[in-house]
Amino acid sequence: MKPKDRVIFALDVPNIIDAERYITLLDVNSREDYRVGAIKIGLELFMGAGLAVVRIIRRPVMLDLKLHDIPETVERAILRAGDLGVTFVTLHVQQRDTMRRAARAAEKGGIQLLGVTVLTSMTGADMDDLRYTTSEPSDRAIYLARMAWQEGITGFVASAMEVGRLRAQLPKSLLVIPGIRPAGADAGDQKRTGTPAQAIADGADYLVVGRPIRDAPDPAAAADAIAAELPPDRSAS
């Protein structure tokens, strides 16, 4: 795996016109000269462009809709996602039956499920508001990931602050880490962030990077700079 293959660009734009611009700027559909390894399509773009944007991307797609519904609805949605040919689908880690059925559907559709543990925008105060037994977001994230692993979910979205603990406790899991910011960059509305190199050193498989690339004067150069911070694949050493 090349360092750039670890970078998932969060294509957080409102419409397909803007999406096509970044796909071109980052050479996403190039066989060799692509700048990022995968594309994340979130709620904003999916609402603005629908399935059309999935079909114009010829790299792995992370469909980040963070599914959270009754078991049958989630199961059926994942089966439909399999029809689209996306690589990753996210869902909130909640009900055990939902996770079991989602895992079976994902296996049938050839999808890597990513369990969303605790959003990177959440803090200890948010934990208290929800009356969780812990005020520490990382503790909650670890607990949820371990529960989801028991139900067949092997991939997780978590912050850079807990990636090391997740790698130690679930060594065979696939870890996708958002909230990545180059050193000195503005965190924005993210509260639990990390640098690219540190997240990989702690055990991340993939990094989700949005604003540091999207809002850069030269998005391609920004993507190249992030990839340059990363070491080769752990398994290759």
Image (spheres, rainbow, N blue to C red):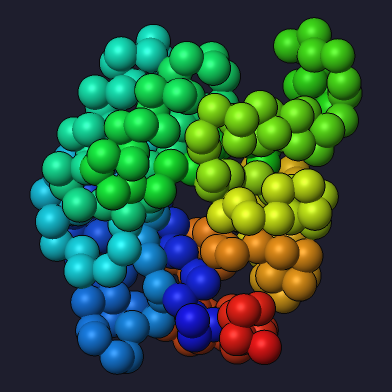
Q: Is residue 84 above or below residue 101?
A: below
Q: Is residue 8 left or right of residue 38?
A: right
Please name whichever residue, 166 or 56, is drawn nearer the observer in this view of the structure. Answer: 166
Q: Quadrant of the C terminus?
A: bottom right
Q: Quadrant of residue 104?
A: top left
Q: Is residue 38 left or right of residue 178?
A: left
Q: Tally the numbered discs.
A: 0
Q: Is residue 185 among the parts visible in the rendering?
A: no
Q: Quadrant of residue 143?
A: top right
Please name whichever residue, 97 or 162, is drawn nearer the observer in this view of the structure. Answer: 97
Q: Is residue 173 left or right of residue 162?
A: left
Q: Is residue 27 left or right of residue 119?
A: left
Q: Is residue 147 above or below residue 186?
A: above
Residue displayed at 31% across by 23% down? 75
Please name whichever residue, 231 or 21, is drawn nearer the observer in this view of the structure. Answer: 231
Q: Is residue 104 among the parts visible in the rendering?
A: yes
Query: Residue 91 at x, y = what percent?
Result: 46, 32
Residue displayed at 61% across by 35% down? 149
Residue displayed at 12% across by 49% down? 52
Query: Residue 68 at x, y = what percent?
Result: 44, 20
Query: Residue 5 at x, y = what percent?
Result: 45, 76
Query: Residue 45 at x, y = what percent?
Result: 29, 45
Q: Quadrant of residue 144?
A: top right
Residue displayed at 31% across by 63% down? 60
